[in-house]
Each structure stands twice: as C-alpha cells, then as structure tokens.
Image (cartoon, coloured by chain):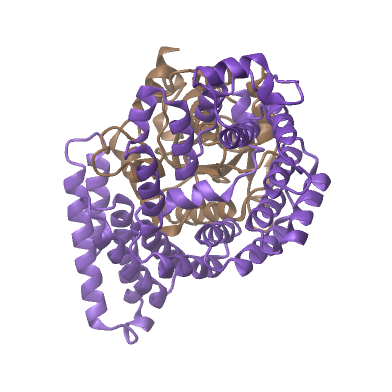
Chain colours: A brown, B purple
Amino acid sequence: VSALAHTKIILHAVQNPHAQIHGILVGRYRKPTTSGATPILQIAEAFPVCHSAPTKPLLDMAFRLAEAYCKGSSIAYDNDKEEEDSSSSSSTQIVGWYTANERLDDVQLSPSALRVMGTIAAAATQQGESLPANAEPCLFLVNNNKLGEMMLGGEEGALEAYGRDARKQWQNPVPSSHFALADGSCALAKAACSIKDKKSVRLFDFEDHLHGGAEAIKDSDWLSNPTVSAFVQKS
Amino acid sequence: VCRCLQDYRKHKTNKPRGLSFLKGTAALNFPKIMAGILNGGEDLSSLLARNDHLAILRYVRSHKLREPEMTIHHGRALLKGTLDDTSDSPSSSPMSIIRELLGLSLNESETLAVLEQVCTAALDVYDDTLAKRCLAQIKKRVQNPDESARVMRLIGLSHESAGEIPEAFAVYDELLNNNPANSFALQRKYCILRSQVGKEAEAMDALNDCIGKNQGDAAGWLEMGRLCLDICDYKGAAFCYEELVVANPLDDTLHCMLGEIYATLGGLSNLKMARKHLAQSLDLCSSGGNLRALYALVAVAGSFLEESASARKRKEVNGDDVEVAKELVKYGAENLTKMYKGSRMSEAVAHVMEAQLADI
C-alpha cells in the first residue's frame, strides 16, 4: 500500500469522524517472481467516495470516473524504477474498496461494503483482460480502535485487509504479515492529520465534490486531491 | 486529533442534523424570522464582529446550530466569576453587585439560559469539568432542581457523557413517566442505543417509538432513513424518505436521495420512479443544477436503457419511456460536460459521458 493511498485513507477517516467512509482503491496486480506464488497487489492510489451510506447511482458514477481517470493520467508506483518487464503487471485499475465504520468499537464489515466488493469482483472478472491467476480485489477496513492508538503515538497501522472467503463474501481476514505499508506511511498520515490549517491539506471525496455545487468544481477535485498529493510528495 | 478520536464516541443529537438537511424548507424560516426580530435582523458574522456575547448565544440557540466551541467561548465571557461562585446567595457577592451597578450583569433567567447552553456545549466537547461546574451552578439557582425537566435533561446528558448508561436511562425513564411524549428523552434513549454496537434492533425499536409519538418529526424520519440505509434495507429507507418528501415537497436534496434509493433497489418500475424524483430534484434546484442529481440521472437513465434492452423485458417496456430515458442521458451528459470545462477532471468526465452516450 503506497504512502499516498494510506495517507488519503487515514485523512478521509479523520476528517469525517462522525460518519462511515468509503472509497475506491486503485492499483495493479503483479505476477509473482517465482511461479506458483500468489500475485502481488500493489495499491497506488485511493479515491475517497462518500461519507454516508453508498447508493447505486453514486457508486456507478464514481467507478466510471475513477476508471476513466486511471486510463487518462499516469499513476506512479513506488518501485517503478525496479520494474523491467512491464508485462508482469496488469494495467492500473480498480482493485479494492476501503471503508471505516461510524462507531468507535464497531469492527464489523458493514453490509454495504460487502455488497460493493461483490460488484467490484464481478466487474473485475468481466474486464476481459487477463489477470494473473488467483488475483482478486481486496477490501480494507480502518479499525477505529487501532486508528486511535496510531494517532496517539503507536507504530502499528490501522488497516485491516480482507480477502474472498469460501462463501464468496469478503470476510476472510488477511493476516497483517501478508500486506505491507510503504515505509514511513504511518508517520506521514499522522502528520497530515495534525496540520492545524485544515484548508491547506483538505481531502475531498466525491460526495463533498457534489455538494460543493457547480461553482466549486475546480476546487474540490476528488480524483487527484492535489493539496494532499503535494503534501505527500514534499515530505 | 485526540478529540477527533473521541468524536467517534459522540452521541449524536437529532436536531441539528435534521434541520441542516431541510435547508430549503419553510420550516426553517420561522426561527430565522423570530431571531431577526430579536436581533434586529443581524446575521452571525456581524454579531461575531461586534463580539456581542449574549446576542451570539441567542442566535445559536434559536437557529439550533451546533457550535460548541463558539458557545463555550462566548458563554465563558459572560459568566466570568459566576462559575466559581461558592456563596449560597449568588446575587449578593461583592463582584456581582459591582457588575450590576455597571450594568454588565445578566439577570437571573439569562444566567440560567447561558449556563444551560454552556453546559450542553461542554458535554459536546467532552469538557467534563466545565460541564460539572455549570451544572452545579444551575442546581444552586433553581428552586426545585429534582423536579425541573430542563435540569434533568442536563443531568441525563452528563451521565451519558460519563458513560454511566444505566443512570442515564433511569433519568430519561423518569422524564417519560412524568410526560410520556417527552421527545427529548425518547431521542436520547435512541441515541444511547445507537452508539452501542450490537444493539441495532433495539435502536430501531426506540426510534420507532420516537416517530410513533411524534408523527411529524422530520428529523426522526431522516434518522430512520439513515438507519435503514446502513443495514441495506432499501425498501424501508424508501418509505422513510417518501414520508420526508410528503412533508417537504420542495426540498431538492430529499428528492435526489429518494431517487438514488429507488435506483439502488433496481428493477424497471423503480428506475422509472427514480428518474421522476431526480428530474423533480433538478427542477427544484434553482442554482444551475444539482450536480449529484445530474450524475444520478445519467446513471439511472443508463441503467433503465440497459435493463429495458434485455429481450424479455422489451415487451413490457413502453417505447416512450425508452425515448425519454435517452433524452435524459443526453441532457445530463451535456450539462455535466459543460460544467466541467476547464477543470482538471474534465477529461475523465467527458470520457464517461461519451461512453454513456455511445451506449444509447
């Protein structure tokens, strides 16, 4: 999980503390270096979508816009320089969903998040592009308790990953040893959240963008969120 | 950030959210008119510029704004010295006599009102010390604190804030004993249950109770709608939002939300309903078009065309409906592309809209 994506997820959660949050994870699948191993999922970007229960039209549009954006602009990966063979990874696409719950001790995955994962998975198989074998999208939950600990100085991350389980639901927790945050992600996220001047590093999600109205379209770019990207790049 | 974390535990009150949602409706104009009369028609920014503490607090109270920091700041300025008053008859201390002579003091009812407001605001931001001090002062000044409903409300809230749930429930139950239709107590009971994980069913029952006793409570219906959406009960959510729309037919956000819910339910007849509500939402929105409704309209009309294209359903579908849907997609796509011209996202938006138009 790249530092940028991680920062955006945490910022989204902290800026909407009273609400459930949802967002798209974008990245690519890489074929494993040794045959027989499972493919690696690299998450480069996170697009925050909403801070209330998601509805179908909103999600529909959000997915389409996210996909169009991925095709249009170049999304950077942390280890692009090491990449020799570009055919070993798929194109950048929607690879997952992140969510956080309203209440502090609620660590269950909400039914709406699970439904969304179902549609993401269905769309992934329909893509027609050949994905590496066993590649599947991933669901991330921000554990509110761990988020609190992280904010107050702990080093452990607050994200929990879930993969597909036997019943085709996304309830299978992925052990934390199997996924990694890019170096310094936690510190970066904490720094972003502690900035006093909220306007300089403000994360907009799709819902904010829509509520801002026609006049504020240029200011509330939820796809690139330039203030946040600039902050991450500077640090 | 620590406070943001504590906010996760915050018990929500229904009133501010309900009112902020119904922004376009006549229901909100009445308090504005009253406040205008009281404040001479001033708005918040000019009051803040003048630093008129009492008027600001009155404004916040009458508009039911949720601004705890502002309230505490101005309330403390007014209550200087009163909070630490340990004398038995507060109005006879030397400081207060001097203040009265200087025309600076509040009279008794004003003091109580300010104390109440500051107490609630302090509980909102987890400032327990300030809340306790306010509560102590209020209890001293009120004739029969144990029988006063307003005092009991504050006691209930402070129990909630301290996490003493059974005591809080006891207080609210007593309020309900005295007055079975006490909406505040009903709402607080619901809020407590809502904040506890695993008690969703009881929370729904409590909310049903609230709404049952106050049929016209828009905030209650709104909350119920949200609860239904959270557990993916879209039919229930549609019912709640229908009630809201009946009560507030001129609010474009409600129509938009209802349209989206029908779209989430899916199916040709629901998509038709969705389309109608979204169109109504766009109609009602005066300023250049409701972005959310435009996007939703394009999505809904697109889904309608997709569903109606499947061979089986072609017989059930009216040719006119299909034409209307196509026109709506064109309308939405054109407007959105126009709005995004010149912004970074215009490429992505244009791409999506073209894809939609191509599907027709």
- Residue drawn at x 53%, y 50% as measured from the top left: B15
User: What x and y, as percent, mark residue B243?
Assistant: 47, 69
**Image position of B198 (left or right of A207):** right
User: What x and y, as percent, mark residue A131?
Assistant: 48, 45
**Image position of B222 (left or right of A202):** right
Q: Is residue A217 visible?
A: yes
Instruction: Indicate the quadrant where residue B310 lies.
Output: bottom left
Q: Quadrant of the C terminus of chain A?
A: top left
**Image position of A60 (left or right of A215):** right
User: What x and y, as percent, mark residue A41?
Assistant: 53, 35
- Residue drawn at x 68%, y 18% as measured from the top left: B93
Instruction: Indicate the quadrant where residue B56 lies.
Output: top left
- Residue drawn at x 39%, y 54% as measured from the top left: B30
- The number of discs equals 0
Q: Is residue A184 visible?
A: no
* Front-most of residues A73 and B187: B187
Seen as rendered, the residue at the extreme front is B101
- Residue drawn at x 28%, y 56% as measured from the top left: B294
Relative vertical location of residue A107 with respect to residue B3 in this rendering, above or below: below
* Front-most of residues B278 and B265: B278
**Image position of B289 (left or right of B272):** left
* Front-most of residues B10 and A49: B10
User: What x and y, as percent, mark residue A79?
Assistant: 47, 21
Q: Quadrant of the N terminus of chain A?
A: top right
* Front-most of residues B68 and A141: B68
Seen as rendered, the residue at the extreme top is A235
